Image: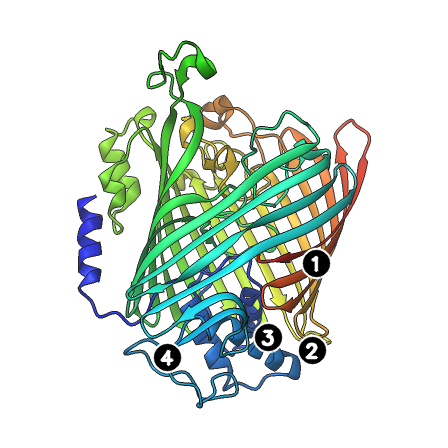
Amino acid sequence: MKGFIAILLLTISLQVTGQTVWENHNAPVYGYLSRMAMKGHIELNDIILPINRGKILEHLDTLQTKQLSAIEKKELGFYFQEYRAALNPFPGAPPLTKGKNNPSSLSPHPSSLSILKKDPFGRFRFLGVSNKDFKLFIDPIIGMQQTVGTPSQYRTLSNGINLWGQAGRLGFQLYYRDFGLTGSGLKLLNQENPNTAFIELFNVDPNKLNHNEVKAHMSYSWKNGSISIGKDHLLWGYGESGKIVLSDRAPSFPYLRLDYQPLKWMSFNYTHAWLNSNILDTIRTYRTGTSGVIGDIRIRYIPKFMATHSVSFLPIKGLTLSVGESMVYSDKLDIGFLIPVMFFKPYDNNRSNYVINAGSNAQFFFQASARNLIKNTHFYSTVFIDEIRLSSIFNSQKARNQLGITAGMSMTDCLLPYLTIGAEYTRVNPFVYNNLIPAQNYSQYNYSLGDWMGNNFDRAVFMMKYTPIPKLRLEMRLQKIRKAGPGTLLQQYEAEPQPPFLFDFQKNRTDMSFNVQYEWLNNLYLFGRLLSTKQSPVNAISTKYRQLNIGLSYGL
């Protein structure tokens, strides 16, 4: 902890030029910016999500000087309404480009109070307060969705609040959303799908389900970095249908996060997270002596943590190379993992006396991304190494290649303007994400921190995305999955040779989906989805499911 405090004190002494407010990783602006980067208009570092709103504004400002289509220009103006009003230039920061979306008639720091009306930049605000030193924005969250088909039919109503802003050197945010579901098949909603898993609130009625989502953070920024304490998701790497390093499949977690970009071509990220092992600590669980009220017991879970850091390099325009390491450890907080530049693996070996039963669960990962090196095209590949024996990597009898890989490409403005097509392949070998110590599995609340399919599977994805008019997003996707069993710890740690890929084969799965989303006003979404799934288990009859979701939401 002392090392972390020292870094914090050092950053406070630096000149402040901006504040960090993390943008929801599901925001449509990420897709827009990714496509602009694919066309070579901007240099986007989106390997780690979420990105702060100030950086998004910088990219939007850069796009004002580029040759854009009519639809792209209208969407640019729309996004400027959202991000330009929220984050004005800061003292010492370069001014934004004087263009259509940054009228010179507006002062650099327009003071305003907007209650149920548009702010100076045309964005409707439920509550917006802005001046040179303080900004506060509050929006309600309201959602309605109807799902029909099989295996689940239900209605979802949600409400909440999104509060965020800046106070001097600090950025802050509170996001809370409560969900109420009514219908049938609700117990299936957390099973084998890429949606973020939720923690169910107690309800005796099987046809009703409640859960909520809460995120919050406070951040301090300086010229080329930021430090945050909060609770949110952290996504790492690329993937159309899942991310093998860090995804949003598991519920969000509390964290300390450091981002630093000392050079234009190099950036560094460090995060320390507090996870939930979901494993009862029987030694620390104790009787309360409350005459049997609610079990007369205080329940404690085994503490679980994750430290991760990565470095990204941009050797040439459009090419990004990244390397990272993570460590999932348990039982008690360890100061060594609070040092951002620590080499976690050898440190853990030393502290555990090289005894596997006393050690932790380490991973290494790599990412290569090439945008517009071939016109309008994005190539990417991710490698996740849970365990590997380099001395016998090609020896089929001795190898322990417990790793995952994703490789994909997409091309935009293909045949039609604003049409993007792509393909992707993912393979995760047996035993990846699992560990000898259950409290150190690569998981949060028993849900994978990586890919939603777990391990011992592969998946091929083909997709098309099209925007025929501004803010209307259409997507068609076909994915084929082969899934096998997770195996046992005995097979993982003692079997030689290791069981082959797709041993204990369980099923084939084919998904076809069509998604439509229209952002009518800033933050007001109309959406629909048609999903068809066919599952073909071994030695069982194939089953087909079809579901239709339609709804609207104010707020993500």
Find residue 28 and report its horizontal and vertical position in percent.
Answer: 58, 64
Residue at point 31%, 71% (across, down): 133
The residue under label 1 is 527
Say if mark 4 contacts mark 2, CB within 8 Å.
no
SS at mark 3? loop
* Three-letter code for the amino acid on which mark 4 is drawn: His
The residue under label 2 is 417
Q: For the residues marked 4 and 2, what is the alpha-carbon distance in whole angstroms?
A: 37 Å
Query: Is residue 372 among what the camera can see?
Result: no
* Three-letter code for the amino acid on which mark 1 is drawn: Phe
The residue under label 3 is 376
* Three-letter code for the amino acid on which mark 2 is drawn: Pro
Which is nearer the N-term, disc 4 or disc 2? 4
Look at discs 4 and 2 and give the one toward the viewer.
Answer: 4
Instruction: Point out which mark residue 109 bears.
Output: 4
Find residue 207 and report its horizontal and vertical position in percent.
Answer: 71, 31
